[in-house]
Image (cartoon, rainbow, N blue to C red):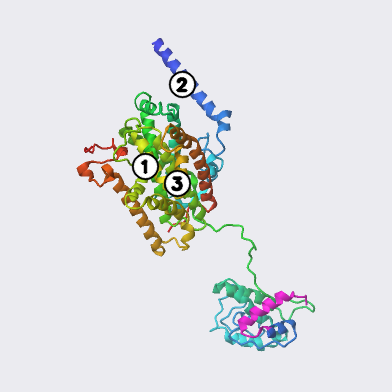
Amino acid sequence: MPEIPEELLRRSAEAKAKALGLPVEQILAEMRGEAPATAVPAESVDVPRPAFVPSPPPPSVPEIPPEPQPPDPASAPPPVTTVVESPPAAEEPAPVAEEPAPAAPEVPENGAGNGRLAATVSVRPSVPPAGVPEGVRHQRLLTVVKARAIQQVKADPTDKVNTWPHLMIAEFTALLAMTAFLLVLSTILQAPLLEAANFNATPNPSKAPWYFLGLQEMLSYFDPQIAGVTVPTVIGIVGFMMIPYIDRNPSTRPSDRKLAIMLFTIFLAGSATLTILGVLFRGPGFNFAYPWVDGVFFDDLKDWVDFGGH
Amino acid sequence: MSARNGIHGLLTKARTHATDMVGRMWSGQFMDSMLRPGSPFKKGYTDTPRNRSYVIMNNVLYHLHPVKVKRHGVKLSYTLCLGGLSFFLFILLTVTGIFLMFYYAPTAERAYIDVQALSTDIAFGSLMRNMHRWGAHLMVLTVFLHMSRVFYHGAYKPPREFNWVVGVILLLLTLLLSFTGYLLPWDQLALWAVTVGTNMAGFVPVIGAQVKFALLGGVEVTAGTLLRWYVLHVLFLPFIIVIFLAVHFWRVRKDGGISGPL
């Protein structure tokens, strides 16, 4: 008998022990030939077909079934009892009939494949138990290992399409649409140009560009140290950069991140409100003014519409 | 009759000649060398998976896009194309900006007159200036909306945290580019908007006065400020933003492409 590596033997024994519900050491000793074979409980040895049994098989089971049925404990027990008790099988120190059972759990997890593999393996070496010449041993199934590389080279398949033309067409269309929009806008609306810069004539009100008007609006409520510095630098820059490091929630589903979405929406709504207030509702002296009464004091919009007023 | 034939014959001959020349140009060595294998403009382009890969891979576009993208990323409703449009507006602003630079001198004497002349004297000057100004406002808007879109999709989450940081820097640079350009027409609107804006910077604790001085190149807006902001606007800030744009696009691909659907 060729020497079987210790770890393979142990692994096989563990699997077999698990399947039979017996202690590992006992099975191991059995496999080494140090202990007599245990009588296997009938219900666990359900895999092998009794094709090799010398006594005539039950009429319902064909000889060497071409398509072995999946293991079925309900139908299997009667022939199996014959296997264990019949003399040819009992002769073997490690009965072949028992071997497939431990191997079975290692096979991929579907019942059909399980039964098929185990049956195939067990049936073939067991067919000629009487006619095996002296010194020739048939092979035993120790374990079944999935054929799989240690390192997975291929990435998991994802649903992908060619960038050309699928993405590029969409991008090119968006780009053309934007160009057209900007051309039309620039043809109808004249960019503002007031009188030449004059250091001695301060316009009233003096307004920042629209994207800073939210800040300028806040300056009229809070101390400049807060509105002009703390809010833009701490919240506006540092705070925004730190968002991914503060928000540790890994989910991207909206229902899982209600707080984050709520806070950001408050920020959006707040900055929009402040900007609109600053653009439309602030008149001379940066005091409140109604655009429909006093007109709009925002020179960037000067030529968009004739607001009247000033 | 014969004259008619003569003209007709001449036209036919000229047309054959022209077709021939165009044909030779398209199949000739020059076109062959200019267009890399797989280019859809190349003669004999066939729509095969291999050529579709080549269009991207053998092209400068390979810096931006992989050969294949996730199917959901192609949907316009997911990104609204906001990032791409921001970049495209940046390119438009560069092109129109270069045009404006031909006709503009950043001095207190000439700046205002030059901008006025752009609107009245120079062919397409008014269109270019309008496109530059509205495009700038639009870019601030698209960058901001792009940030909001990314936030609502949770696309800043690992492994994309750092690209969000780069994105915030890009938003900041966009605002700075827009703000520095605001002063250049040198009219009342520009002068006083910048005065208000830089006054805010003066409230920085401890180093407020220094920050304001560095921004203005003095204690108030002067001709020196104009030159300073011009250089920042046309040279320094575009240079910096291009570097950050490169990092931003590169990280989009390195972090696994566009984020997944919700």
Residue type pointed to by label 3: Gly
Q: Residue drawn 58% across and 32% down?
A: B33
Q: Residue drawn 46% across and 57% down?
A: A243
Disc 1: which residue: B196
Camera-nearest label, 2 or 1: 1
Q: Nearer the viewer, residue A192 or B107?
A: B107
Mark 2–mark 3 Cα distance, whole angstroms, equals 72 Å
Q: Position of residue A94 (x, y in %)?
A: 71, 83
- Whether residue A137 is visible to the viewer of this picture, yes or no, is yes
Mark 1 and mark 3 in contact (Cβ < 8 Å)? no
**Secondary structure type for disc 3:** helix
Mark 2–mark 1 Cα distance, whole angstroms, equals 65 Å
**Secondary structure type for disc 2:** helix
Q: Which residues are magenta?
A: A1-24
**Secondary structure type for disc 1:** helix
Q: Which numbered tag is attached to residue B26?
A: none
Which chain does the residue under circle 3 lie in? B
Q: Residues within 10 Å of mark 1 (few under 14, many from 20)?
A: some
Q: Is residue B241 left or right of residue A49?
A: left
Q: Nearer the viewer, residue A171 or A296?
A: A296
